[in-house]
Amino acid sequence: MVKVSYQQKPYRRILMETYGAQVFASPSDHTQYGKSVLAADKDNPGSLGIAISEAVEAAASSGGAKKYSLGSVLGHVLMHQTVIGEEALMQMDLAGEYPDVVISCVGGGSNFSGIAYPFLRHNLKDGRKTRLLAVEPDAAPSLTKGVFTFDYGDTAKMAPVVKMHTLGHGFVPEPIHAGGLRYHGMAPSLCALYDAGYIEAVAVPQVATFDAAVQFARAEGILPAPESAHAIRAAIDEALDAKQKGDKRVILFNLSGHGHFDLAAYEAYLAGKLQDFKYPADKVKAALADLPEVKIPA
């Protein structure tokens, strides 16, 4: 479990341990790569890229005793998640509506792709004009500020090299509470679609995201996960924009998770302790200096 999430979301760990799991904070001293990260920086907050590296090493060195399935950025996971979008299409049909814009948070890609790809199909095949808006955090803006190039999916360079929007596999995002969005890269198919102009993306700051989350909780009675709150922020902004312009705009967004295990984040917000993190251009520049060299045959 990524160290910053291990610390910020203890109840997730406790739930897993209740079911018999052993949970370690990554970077850990249980893998050679984790030890090397800690040797360089004992206070490293961890990242999804580092955790993936440790998981791959643990599985690869176990003699087959341990398995690891890489998710979120890979095509089969994105396609599996499209059941969400297929159900949303049917729900919209029952409501007698069709969305002008579909919104979801994005970190690795499966959440957004799951709801957006079925609507993309209608755009491509049926001539629909639905906007597809991916919402990422300012602290890890891989789509909006990353480079579209070949990179590793993990920090230790054990995962496959893929072409994606990346901030550099060595980039460690700031410790925002939306741990599921703290990834340096993005799903290759989603990146190709963004690069071709089929989808849109926007990055939002942490405090404004929690503003939206609390507003939503008090209006709807549902406490959203910090990751999902990014979609809520963008949905509210869309609604306000439509109101200002006098537009009738049907907005569909993906509320992908509850925040019952994220109360520490809400406590920090309510106490005024949350902060925004600026785009770390210098750190990203340093991370991008270590991109793999990929030669494409002519």
Image (cartoon, helix red, strand yellow):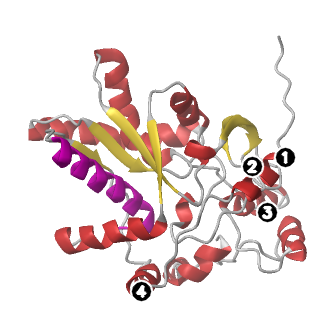
Q: Quadrant of the C terminus?
A: top right
Secondary structure found at label 4: helix
Q: Nearer the viewer, mark 4 or mark 1?
A: 1
Q: Between marks 3 and 1, how big is the CA–CA gap?
A: 28 Å
Q: What is the x, y in percent for residue 160? A: 76, 41
Along the polypeptide, which appears first: circle 4 or circle 1? 4
Q: Which class describes the residues within 10 Å of circle 4: few (<14), some (14-19), or many (20+)?
A: few
Q: What is the x, y in percent for residue 137? A: 51, 58
The residue that disc 4 covers is: 267
Mark 4 belongs to which amino acid? Glu
The residue that disc 1 covers is: 289
Q: Are marks 2 and 1 in contact (CB under 8 Å)?
A: yes
Q: Quadrant of the N terminus?
A: bottom right
Residue at x 43% of width, y 78% of height:
261
Q: Which stretch appears magenta? A: 223-245
The residue that disc 3 covers is: 58
Nearer-the-camera pick, 137 or 163: 137
Asked if residue 239 is among those painted magenta in the image, a careful observer would answer yes
Along the polypeptide, which appears first: circle 3 or circle 2? 3
Mark 3 belongs to which amino acid? Ala
Residue 250 visible in the picture: yes
Along the polypeptide, which appears first: circle 3 or circle 4? 3
Along the polypeptide, which appears first: circle 3 or circle 1? 3
Q: What is the x, y in percent for residue 34? A: 82, 69
Along the polypeptide, which appears first: circle 4 or circle 2? 2
Q: Which class describes the residues within 10 Å of circle 2: few (<14), some (14-19), or many (20+)?
A: many
Left or right? Give the position of 98 relative to 271: left
Secondary structure found at label 1: loop
Residue at x 56% of width, y 29% of height:
195
Mark 2 belongs to which amino acid? Gly
